């Protein structure tokens, strides 16, 4: 019985330590990152694709992915390439689910 209580206590403490580290994404973050991304030709090309555009505008998982991008690093080429691959990957995954 003591072991179970101790286990629950340890899990509770870990949750309080980990939960604040999980990034919270809001519409403001998403909008700000989209504004930065619109400066890049690859993102404009994605927006021209009707199915991708719908996902970027309406799909919560895609929007949360965009919101998690670090807006300070969106101007750096190495991060831009990484974010491009990540966004293309999730869009490809989502369009595969729709067909």
Image (cartoon, grey):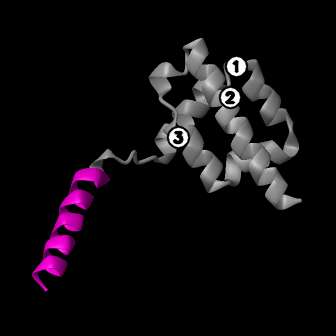
Q: Is residue 5 magenta?
A: yes
Circle 1 SS class: loop
Circle 2 SS class: helix
**Residue, x 68% and y 37% (percent of image)?**
87
Give the percent coordinates (x, y) of residue 46.
Answer: 79, 33
**On the rendered image, what quadrant is the C terminus found in?**
bottom right
In contact (CB < 8 Å): disc 1 and disc 2: yes
The image's mark for residue 84 is 2
The Cα–Cα distance between marks 3 and 2, rounded to whole angstroms, is: 13 Å
Classified by dominant secondary structure, the portion drawn in magenta counts as: helix
The image's mark for residue 97 is none
Q: Which residues are magenta?
A: 1-19
Q: Is residue 92 magenta?
A: no
Give the percent coordinates (x, y) of residue 57.
Answer: 69, 47
Circle 3 SS class: helix
The total number of labels drawn is: 3
Residue bearing the label numbered 3: 67
**Residue, x 61% and y 55% (percent of image)?**
60
Give the image quarter of residue 85: top right
Residue bearing the label numbered 1: 40
Q: Nearer the viewer, mark 1 or mark 2?
A: 2
Identity of the residue furthest to the bottom in this view: 1
Give the image quarter of residue 41: top right
Judge left or right: residue 54 versus residue 10.
right
Q: Residues within 10 Å of mark 3 (few under 14, many from 20)?
A: many
Q: Nearer the viewer, mark 3 or mark 2?
A: 2
């Amino acid at each position: 019985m003591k072991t179970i209580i101790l286990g629950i206590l340890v899990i509770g403490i870990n949750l309080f330590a980990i939960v604040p580290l999980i990034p919270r994404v809001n519409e403001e973050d998403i909008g700000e990152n989209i504004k930065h991304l619109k400066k890049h030709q690859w993102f404009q090309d994605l927006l021209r694709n009707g199915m991708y555009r719908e996902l970027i505008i309406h799909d919560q998982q895609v929007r949360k992915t965009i919101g998690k991008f670090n807006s300070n690093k969106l101007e750096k080429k190495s991060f831009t390439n990484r974010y491009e691959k990540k966004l293309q990957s999730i869009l490809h995954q989502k369009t595969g689910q729709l067909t």
